[in-house]
Amino acid sequence: MKILVIEDDREAAEYLEKALGEAGHNAHVARDGETGFELAGRGDYDVLVVDRMLPKRDGLSVIAGLRARGVETPVLILSALGEVDDRVTGLRAGGDDYLTKPYAFNELLARIEVLSRRVGSKDVETMYRAGDLELDRLSHTVKRAGKEIVLQPREFRLLEYLMRHAGRVVTRTMLLENVWDYHFDPQTNVIDVHVSRLRSKIEKGFDAPVLHTVRGAGYMLKAG
Amino acid sequence: MPAIMKTTAARLSALFLILFALCATVLVFYMSSLSVRMLETQTQETVAAEVQVLGRAYQRGGLPLLVRFVETRSRQPGANLYLIADPNGRILSGNVESLEPGVLEIDGWTERSFEYRRFGEQQGAANGDEDAAGTGQRHRAVALVLRLPNQMILLVGRDLGEPEIVRDIVNRALILAFGMMGFGALLIWFFVGRRALKRIDTVSHASQRIMEGDLSERLPVSGSGDEFDRLSEKLNVMLGRIARLNDGLKQVSDNIAHDLKTPLTRLRNRAEGALSGKKSSGDYREALEATIAESDHLIRTFNAILMISRLEAGYSAEQTGEVDLAEIVADVVELYEPVAEEQGVALEAAVSGKAPVTANRELVAQALSNIVDNAIKYSAGTCDAPKVVVSLRTDGSSFTLEVADNGPGIPEDDRERATERFVRLEQSRSQPGSGLGLSLAKAVMKFHGGGLELSGRNPGLSVKMTFPGESRQT
């Protein structure tokens, strides 16, 4: 995947370039808003990672400018600001996701990978499948090996999100944001308990595990 | 500008003085010129009427009758001026002894007043008091000069004594008016300057002391409720808020210094420990993972501190919208229910109907989840059937969210302290947490204009979050 990182801090930018490279991506770095805007304007990147405070042109203006020019590349905003409504202003400017510094690299990576799939996303599909596990979005039913599994509404949405991003790492924060629509930081491992409940429902009595814990990162739904 | 003019009182007084003086002058001059003109018209009419009478006498009896008429009229008290002269200007008859030269050469109305002496003025009786002063006194008059067909000159005039008296009165009125205005300006200066503006001075002195660093100083309030009091009260509220923010800031920096130093030291020690001696790669990995976990904890604490400070800095309507408290309760209870069950705590929501308030959904959810989190944590394993109930009540406009548990509770003396930053009561030292959960919840409630209240349940603790009705305090 081709990723453009617009970040003015040299060390942070170099680290991202290297770490994204190790994760199998091709990352480029722009050190100020103008350069970033020009590079991103060519439109051949899969994901943009944009810091909010940049020299020459600030991040939000870069994003708004790109959107105005019809560049629809998914954008992940990085910000050191933590105001209550920062996320809202960021997303309103045209960003697709928002991450507050300091962040865990695994969180950033997971979000980038999910973002890149947004273009031509699976949103329109009515049926998700992973091995012998299938989820029907229209009839709200889940079956494994042909046998129906009864889930609570929230468990259904949790599984739906995991299956939409099957094969990708999904972090706890991403789950809280996308399944519960909350962005705060619950002090306890509430998400873990929800996931393990779901796991017991979709794995108990079946041979192969499908819901995997990825150490230090989150979860991944993957068959076989 | 002279020093005295630098005070508002003096400037106001001067302004009033000038304005009033201007008005008075215009008014007085208008009135006086009006009355002078009126008197002049009257004079001319009187003179014209006399001339007519004399003219008819002349037509009837010629010069002799005219002279007789003039003589008779001249002797009447308060008489007009009468004069008959020959073509050379010699006075033949009348009550005028002498005239300013040139007057008799005029034909018609004298354009301006002239000086004359009245004949036989030493007797004094004819012209009243003003002439008693002495003989030959000069007077001013206007007159109509006519040439009779036989080249004789007839002059009928009227003394200008009266218009001059009017002018005199006007002048005196002006002096009086100016005097009163001067006095008025002094009064204004006294009341505005000495009393009202003095209070502004006290306010400015008080603010000087505040600027010099005494944030506990407040502006004086006289209790009269006037605009100065209102201003002082508003400024005092503002000062109170600044002082609170200042204290908060100071406390935060103290706390940051104290509470972040400990984990930072641990972090450093761990890194040092990992570097010293021979270690396997597994050891390194373990040390690094522990380091990351520790720094995550630090970041979390730091975020909470920042958030509390920002919330305390003030309310902004942009960050709020209409939210349903009932929905938030349902969400949070649903979020925590599995954790509660895992820890053997029964978590229930007692909510019915909608509860619309103007609030920030994220913040309220976070505050409630902090409280529920605490309730579960502290009641777990403390009795046979630990139970946490989240209930929502309303008294019409305001709403109260209550999280009640049947755990050990908090001793009454400690309850107030429990919501302070970083305060972790002795009994809770063993539990994980930043010690900021309740302070954050309290900051959130204050941000919304509400409050957070802890009370005992015997056994257990009740935490009430109150949301005010529509009339929000900003």
Image: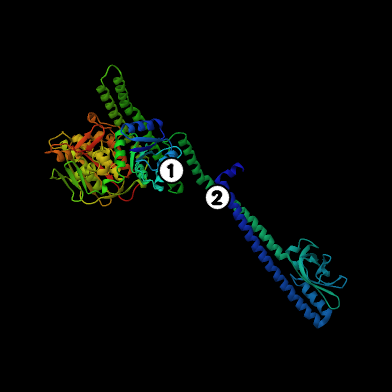
Question: What's the CA distance linking mark 2 and mark 1?
Answer: 28 Å
Q: Give the residue type at disc 1.
A: Leu
Given residues B136 and A38, the one toward you in this image is A38
> Dot 1 surroundings within 10 Å: few (below 14), some, or many (20 or more)?
some
Given residues B388 and B181, the one toward you in this image is B388
Could you say whether the residue bearing mark 1 is in a helix, strand or loop?
A: helix
Q: Residue at x 22, y 51 (%)?
A: B353
Percent coordinates x, y for residue A3 in the rendering = 35, 38
Where residue B301 sits, quadrant-wise, is top left
Percent coordinates x, y for residue B117 in the rendering = 80, 65
Q: Are marks 2 and 1 on the same chain?
A: yes
Q: How many marks?
A: 2
Residue B153 drawn above or below residue B257? below
Percent coordinates x, y for residue B65 in the rendering = 81, 79
Q: Extreme right residue here?
A: B88
Q: Residue at x 29, y 40 (%)?
A: A114
Percent coordinates x, y for residue A139 in the rendering = 18, 51
Quadrant into which the N terminus of chain B falls: top right
Where residue A96 sits, quadrant-wise, is top left
Q: Give the residue type at disc 2.
A: Ile
Given residues B261 and B167, the one toward you in this image is B261
Q: Which residue is mark 1?
A: B235
Residue B252 drawn above or below residue B333? above
Which chain is disc 2 placed on? Answer: B
In the rendered view, does B458 fall on the left or right side of B321? Answer: left
Q: Which residue is mark 2?
A: B188
Residue B126 drawn above or below residue B181? below
Could you say whether the residue bearing mark 2 is in a helix, strand or loop?
A: helix
